[in-house]
Image (spheres, grey):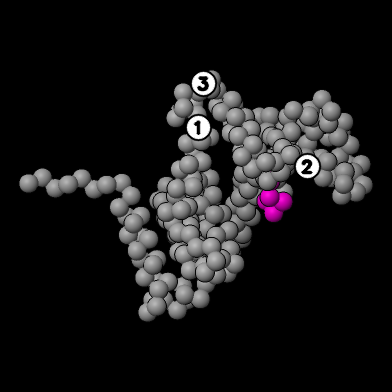
Amino acid sequence: MASMAVQPGHAFLELVAVMDRLRSPGGCPWDARQTHRSLVEYLVEETYETVEAIETDDRAGLREELGDLLLQVVFHARMAQEDPRDPWDIDDVAEGIVAKLVTRHPHVFAGEVAGTAEEVEANWHARKALEKGRSSVTDGIPMQLPALVLASKVLARSVAFTDDLGVPGEMEPALGAVGGIVDESQFGDLLLALVSIGCDEGWDAEAALRGATRRRMESIRALEGSDE
């Protein structure tokens, strides 16, 4: 008799079971003592290691880092089951994102027409604001984001106010006056203008700076090697 095909997601259920054993009595003491707060540093670290694998085209590394990132999701969900006041689990997490994806993709699930990716993104933000009762397009942007990412998000959401605010990318005078910058505020305005130019070109400011820094590090290592 032919063997049954393995269903997608079967290994995920095994991960959930392993995490449950680690966290349960008789499991791992280190896992048992963790809290949502104590795991924040690992969540951030695994996120950036995943970004590194993507930016360096490390496919094997990406597979591994996505696993480490997935562990963080399962770990947090498993801890949440134990909350005496408001318990929830990995199924609640999955059901929540499924409902969100279906609601925010009416062009796929409800027959609505969306002609371009830009229209899809605009509709997404509009529905998100409506769902959350937000009064400003900037509501919900975490101020803890890296500064370049934060700037990119604010610029992307403020397109409708261009006539009133101006475009930071219109910066030839600013570039010409780089040597005349006298305070941190002017330096910040210049950085924002550079981020705006990147957004117009479809470039990721954070990735661009990491790439430039990575190239600088490679040059430093090359010089260090030449001295041997």
- Observer-nearest residue: 72 or 200? 72
Question: Per the image, is 144 magenta?
Answer: yes
Question: Mark 1 or mark 2: which is in front?
Answer: 1
Label 3: how many residues lie within 10 Å, few (<14), some (14-19) or many (20+)? few
155 relative to 206, above or below: above
Q: Tell me what residue is drawn at x 58 percent, y 58 percent.
A: 44
Q: Which residues are magenta?
A: 141-145
Q: Which residue bears the numbered disc 1?
A: 105
- The amino acid at mark 1 is His
Question: Mark 3 or mark 2: which is in front?
Answer: 3
Secondary element at tag 2:
helix
Secondary element at tag 3:
loop
Q: Mark number for residue 191?
A: 2
Q: Which residue bears the numbered disc 3?
A: 113
Distance (Cα) linking label 3 and label 2: 38 Å
Please tell me in which quadrant of the rendered image residue 151 appears: top right
Label 1: how many residues lie within 10 Å, few (<14), some (14-19) or many (20+)? some
Please tell me in which quadrant of the rendered image residue 165 appears: top right
Q: Tell me what residue is drawn at x 60 percent, y 29 percent.
A: 123
